[in-house]
Image (tube, rainbow, N blue to C red):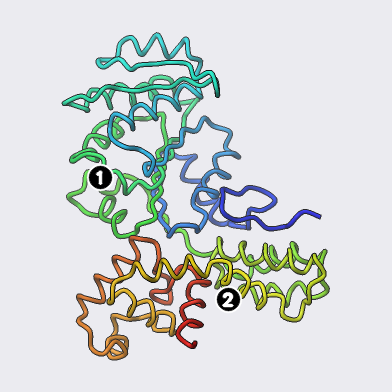
Amino acid sequence: MINSFKFGSVVDDPFFTNRVEELAKVKQILESNNHLVMISPRRFGKTSLIRKTVKNLKRDVLSLDLQLVSGVEDFAAQYLKRIYRIFPSEKIKHLIKNFRIIPSLSLNPINNEVDISFKATESTLPLLEDVLNLLEQLCNSKHRAIVILDEFQEVMRLEKGFDKKLRSIMQFHKNINYVFLGSQESMMREIFEKKKSPFYHFGLFFQLQKIEKSHFKIFLTTGLKNICKQPEKLADEILLFTDGHPYYTQQLAYTVWNNVNQKASQIHAVKNAIEETIQTHDLDYERLWNTFNKTDKKTIIGLSQGNHLPLSQSGLNKNNSVATSTIFSSLKRLMQNGYVIKTNKGYEIDDPFFNSWTIKRREL
């Protein structure tokens, strides 16, 4: 039998979990002439959600992760490379001849793809205009493309004023839906909600939450029912630990499924799977812990003890009256690095296994 759960990569059916309402909302936006801004912490399934939506729409899709882009020239080269994947090369070559900055093109014999590069230039605006407008020219009202720019908050590090240049070009495109994905909420909100920002209100804002537990329970129960007698009980125990976090729920369910399928006891199946995962990553968590400064360690400890509102008066009292600004800076730093997330409850440690590791280590 094949394990019913998958984590660590983009997922599709049969591993994709519900998200019926989210799929409908994203589909509705992309079928209009509007753009989409989606934010959530890492590993919440933004990429899987958007990939599943566009797959069903059956439209040309250009996807680029800005984390992997080294500069503006590289952005233009990677963007153009993806255009080559969609459209016939002969048609594109004819249009590229009119570029003000001609790229270097070569055929990669290993993957049979076109490798593209641009030389560094003092003014990147003509370069960006030519490349981004190329896709607009290749599309029309009946053949509209979708451009997905993942980790879009990285736009701020590529070049000063890069966001302004992008907006000045994209605002005139009528044949493209832009999708901006981001994992750092504060930076994404600054880009799209700050009035002075070039991208102010450029797209419809959508914040992706954890998967509804009732929906997740159905998915977990279905995946476990063929290997155990009490799948609902195991599903409840898994969700109690992960609180519906998409990535860690799949990870824990994967380990539980493996253990139970190998005839391990179902009585402590979830507890044993949690302990097994923590033990596997013990050295990783220890190294991670040693990278935190003193204030961040105090913040992590407080969150592990259930202090989800460290900026409240009671939270500050538990932190021995540490200055609000100090706690806020710590939370902001930990959130930017993906260790802490903000939910309806307040703040919490993203990884429930690391949260449990912190508690156990302090009890030794």
Q: Residues within 10 Å of mark 2 (few under 14, many from 20)?
A: some
Give the quarter of the image for residue 344: bottom left
Q: Is residue 80 visible?
A: yes
Give the quarter of the image for residue 296: bottom left
Vertical order, 44 against 152 (above or below)? below
Q: Tell me which amino acid carries mark 1.
A: Arg
On the picture, is 199 further left or further right than 355? left
The dot on residue 241 is 2
Q: Position of residue 203 (x, y in %)?
A: 35, 46
The dot on residue 226 is none
Q: Position of residue 95 (x, y in %)?
A: 37, 12
Q: Residues within 10 Å of mark 1 (few under 14, many from 20)?
A: some
Q: Which type of secondary structure does the marked residue at label 2 adopt?
A: helix
Q: Position of residue 24 (x, y in %)?
A: 55, 51
The dot on residue 157 is 1
On the picture, is 251 further left or further right than 90? right
